[in-house]
Amino acid sequence: MQDIKELNLLELEEKLSAWGMPKYRAKQIFTWIYKKGAYEFNMMSDLPEEARKKLSEEFSILDLKLADLRSSEDGTTKFLFELPDGNLIEAVNIPASSRGTGCISSQVGCKFACAFCASGLGSFKRNLTTGEILDEVLYLKNNSPEAALTHIVFMGTGEPLDNYDNVLKAIRIINSPVGFNIGARRITISTCGIVPGIERLQKEDLQFELSISLHAADDKTRAQIMPVNKKYPLSDLIKAAREYMAATNRQITFEYILVQGLNADLNSAHKLIILLRDLRLAKVNLIPANPVPELNIYTPHEMEIMRFKDHLFKSGINVTLRRQRGQDIDASCGQLRLKHVKKQI
């Protein structure tokens, strides 16, 4: 049975037309799924009974099963989902006073084995389909306070630009007025630095946010913690970032996880300043590491974090410090999935 969310509006219109149904039914179906959160065709009361029966025979809507749920004292909720093939993925709902952010995965596991991330420890299995990505968004929307899901970040398990076509198709539905209708500037793609993917993004007609995981400002350190740097070294990555900003006039956020004893000292801060000093539209988002004992990752002391941030700020770098969320519920990417994978071994 096909997941109906694999189809964009035009594809669904063509499918319904081939069945002899009017094309306008496609917009009705989109409204029910993406705006009203319908997960069964029988809920679509303005569709004829015959149409609902035909859709139920041919399509599914929501195929995720909830395998685990963790709620933090700060309001963050982490979901572990089981896919129809038994694989596990994670998504996180991060509420705030004026927004609700859904952090979603793009792959089952990850190929890129960043040293600070638990996502790759369970090994890479496969890409998520467009429908599976949208399953996460649909589930988060249906389980957000007053369905207040206002922002989407592709910062969960997997590398979005390694699953480019499915991720971009999902983003277009997330952004579409007849889909989730979440503004492009409220959708963020986070990449570990896949240069060809960044080059492809230059040509897209969406003004989404691009975030690059940097985490070190010299090739030796970055290659040590991010093996992707061996294929796409900093010179190539910064060149691609510069060309992206010139072509799109869009800001790039460089994510920098501060890890105790690794990259949080003032010498590392100075290297970062030199690397980014001529990138006018660059912003640095400092992220104190969530502890991952399996990877010997620990959070720097508060004073060290503030010294690092102040050094960047005084040098003219646009810098922000992300508040830590969900430490009490294994909030780092892949941690909850890893625990369940270990139980199955």
Image: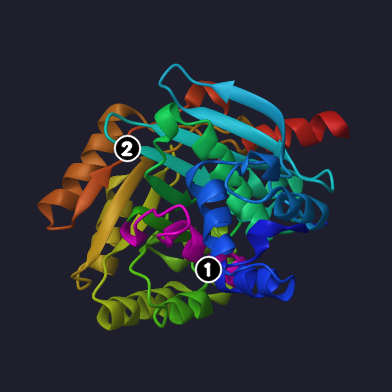
Q: What amino acid does circle 2 point to?
A: Arg
Q: Could you say whether the residue bearing mark 2 is in a helix, strand or loop? A: loop
Kindly identify the residue that appears in the image at 76 percent across and 45 percent down.
83
Say whether disc 1 or disc 2 marks the residue closer to the N-terminus: 2
Q: Is residue 27 visible?
A: yes
Q: What amino acid does circle 1 point to?
A: Leu
Most frequent secondary structure within the magenta stretch: helix
Q: Is residue 113 visible?
A: no
Q: Could you say whether the residue bearing mark 1 is in a helix, strand or loop? A: helix
**Residue 3 in the image: x percent, y percent?**
73, 56
Q: Is residue 344 magenta?
A: no
Viewer-side residue, 71 vs 340: 71
Q: Give the answer, above or below, for where 223 lies relative to 194.
A: above
Q: Which residue is mark 2?
A: 99
Q: Which residue is mark 1?
A: 168
Magenta region: which residues?
Answer: 163-185
**Residue 162 in the image: x percent, y percent?**
61, 68
